[in-house]
Amino acid sequence: MKKYNVAVVGATGAVGREMLSILEEREFPFDNLKLLASERSAGKKMTCKGKEYTVEATTPESFEGVDIALFSAGAGASKKFAPEAAKRGAVVVDNSSQWRMDPEVPLVVPEVNPEDIFKHKGIIANPNCSTIQMVAALKPIYDKVGIERIVVSTYQAVSGTGKAAIDELREQAKAILADEEVKSEVYPYQIAFNVLPHIDIFFDDGYTKEEIKMVNETKKIMGDDSIKVTATAARVPVVYGHAESLNIETKEKLTVSEAKELLDNAPGVSVVDKPEELAYPMQIDVENNDDVLVGRIREDNTIEKGLNLWIVANNLRKGAALNTIQIAERLVQG
Ligand code: A2P
């Protein structure tokens, strides 16, 4: 079996660390592994598959001889270094928002549009975490009955912001319980014991960038500009896992039992929906579960063809590192 030279850019970050675990767990066929981050981390030691690696500062030359470069170091680093990697012959799978809406760059969820992977010109984009779990669950419904409109509200974990935000939540929770002063540096307000209806920057029309990402990325991944999507994104004091409340209007009628059957058979999706046993998806269920969990499936009785769903997935894994590596796996399978 051919083996690949792989670079992980942002290896020291919250998603980068998950990438290293997943490369190991899924036995990705890598030969050499290069761990890259900012200058701050140069010289740091990290382990993957029992071998110790020294983290290097990222430079254009870092990508000489690299076949696959997995990026999760923010949009700035992707803007600067992804073209440098591609120029040197690497295929970049980028987890940042930098290239997602570029018409030349495929935006891929392997369960939804794997064929787009092979249209790449050196860079493939990994969608926003909230979009990935939503489209993975909606794809089987879309294929069966079509989707007219999606109304989504998110309940997103702080790990989506990065390691500093995880630390901030923990520190604030400790401070509050100890009756000490609460310091907010990553978020504009206290996140512990609070909910912020604000993720990423605000636009003039009142929507946030996170909400608009969900609208635009859903249309691009599904390859259908006619789907109407409206989103409200909120940050909740949870470390791992995003939850989403969805109300969808389908083109043809779909009953609850038909929806359950479709979702039960969908790759990467599990139905957790037994209200009589209090079985429904929660963030605590996805810390060690890579599936997109769907539950609370109900008919929306206010419209003719509508469903309500509750969707939960691990934002660092299916929402980021795992989806990125699944794209790389499809790429090498050809
Ligand atoms: P470093 O640890 O050296 O700062 P998180 O999302 O958890 O905050 O992690 C961000 C990741 O991206 C870290 O690995 C960070 O490295 C890396 N990073 C941030 N800026 C750059 C940059 N300009 N070039 C390369 N890596 C970067």
Image: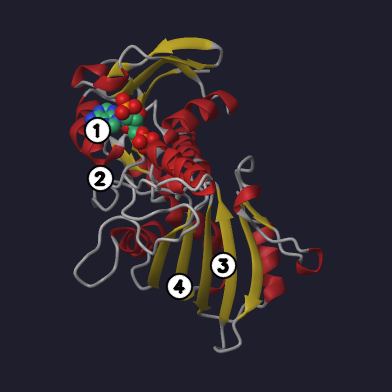
Q: Position of residue 263 (x, y in %)?
A: 64, 61
Residue of label 1: 82
Going by the image, does 312 lie left or right of 135?
A: right
Mark 3 or 2: in front is 2
* Pointer 4 or 1: first along the chain: 1
Three-letter amino acid code at disc 2? Gln
Disc 4 on helix, strand or loop? strand
Task: Give the camera-side residue of 313 and 283.
Answer: 283
Q: Position of residue 217 (x, y in %)?
A: 35, 58
Three-letter amino acid code at disc 3? Ile
Write the residue at 38% across / 72% down. Answer: 230
Residue of label 4: 150
Residue placed farthest to the right in the image? 277
Task: Give the camera-side residue of 176 and 276.
Answer: 176
Residue of label 2: 98
Disc 2 on helix, strand or loop? loop
Q: Are marks 3 and 2 in contact (CB under 8 Å)?
A: no
Q: Which mark is residue 141?
A: 3
What is the basis of the colouring in this image? secondary structure
- Distance between the alpha carbons at the discs numbered 3 and 1: 35 Å
